[in-house]
Amino acid sequence: DGGITQSPKYLFRKEGQNVTLSCEQNLNHDAMYWYRQDPGQGLRLIYYSQIVNDFQKGDIAEGYSVSREKKESFPLTVTSAQKNPTAFYLCASSAPGQGARGYTFGSGTRLTVV
Amino acid sequence: AQSVAQPEDQVNVAEGNPLTVKCTYSVSGNPYLFWYVQYPNRGLQFLLKYITGDNLVKGSYGFEAEFNKSQTSFHLKKPSALVSDSALYFCAVRGAPGAGSYQLTFGKGTKLSVIP
């Protein structure tokens, strides 16, 4: 079955470390997105990519970086510059030409700073 | 710019009673509207959508939503709530193709608690 796989499910980071969250999809979707979710704040867009080798900052891109070298993959790196990285991170994908289908979401990665 | 408002952070309802989770939107042109549900530590799951046609849309798990163009609303409803319906619900909107961004804009979510 097609879908989006996020890994790991839980991730612990020490102060000053960079960590990378994986997001892979086999839906043949062109667009991919990263969201951060904090209690009571809904979903906040970090980065998005509409096509391979291209991506744009979302509303809260500071302290994060992404790459889109393959259509299937959109990894998110949480850098040491992100001062409060503890959150639940969600990856999503969509096919722009099929907007009626909305987004497909992964199951999320919970990142905790220790 | 498009936007979504979910005016209630939390909705409490007794099991067996009808439930409503409210959503209003703002978008240029005709809207594409969606409801998603999120269980703890999980991703968002699609519930239902309105694209065109009948204003009453039926979706998964017995949920339905009513599109009201004049009130720019898309409230989620269920005739009889179950304890297992307790979750976080998100409303989302985008404009029709050609109306600008194809990206979805999400509301902040409403936590639904169904009390046994």
Image: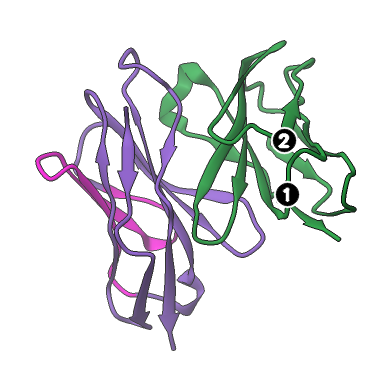
Q: Position of residue B18 (x, y in %)?
A: 27, 74
Tint of chain B? purple
> What mark, if any, has residue B113 been given in the picture?
none
Mark 2 element type = loop
Q: Is residue B33 above or below residue B84?
A: above
Q: Is residue A81 left or right of residue B93?
A: right
Chain letter, colour green: A
Residue placed most toward the observer, A90 or A96: A90
Residue at 32% x, 31% y: name it: B2
- Mark 1 and 2 residues: CB-CB less than 8 Å, in contact? yes
Q: Is residue B63 visible?
A: yes
Q: Position of residue B58 (x, y in %)?
A: 32, 51
Asked if residue A97 is among those painted magenta in the image, a careful observer would answer no
Q: Position of residue B107 (x, y in %)?
A: 40, 48
Q: Which residue is mark 1?
A: A85
Q: Is residue A24 left or right of residue A57?
A: right
Residue placed most toward the observer, B44 or B50: B44
Q: Chain of mark 1?
A: A
Q: Chain of mark 2?
A: A
Q: Is residue B34 above or below residue B8?
A: above
Asked if residue B72 is among those painted magenta in the image, a careful observer would answer yes
Quote the CA–CA distance across marks 1 and 2: 9 Å
Magenta-highlighted residues? B57-80
Q: How many marks?
A: 2
Mark 1 element type = loop
Q: Is residue A25 visible?
A: no
> What mark, if any, has residue A63 been given in the picture?
2
Farthest left residue in view: B70
Q: Is residue A56 left or right of residue B70?
A: right
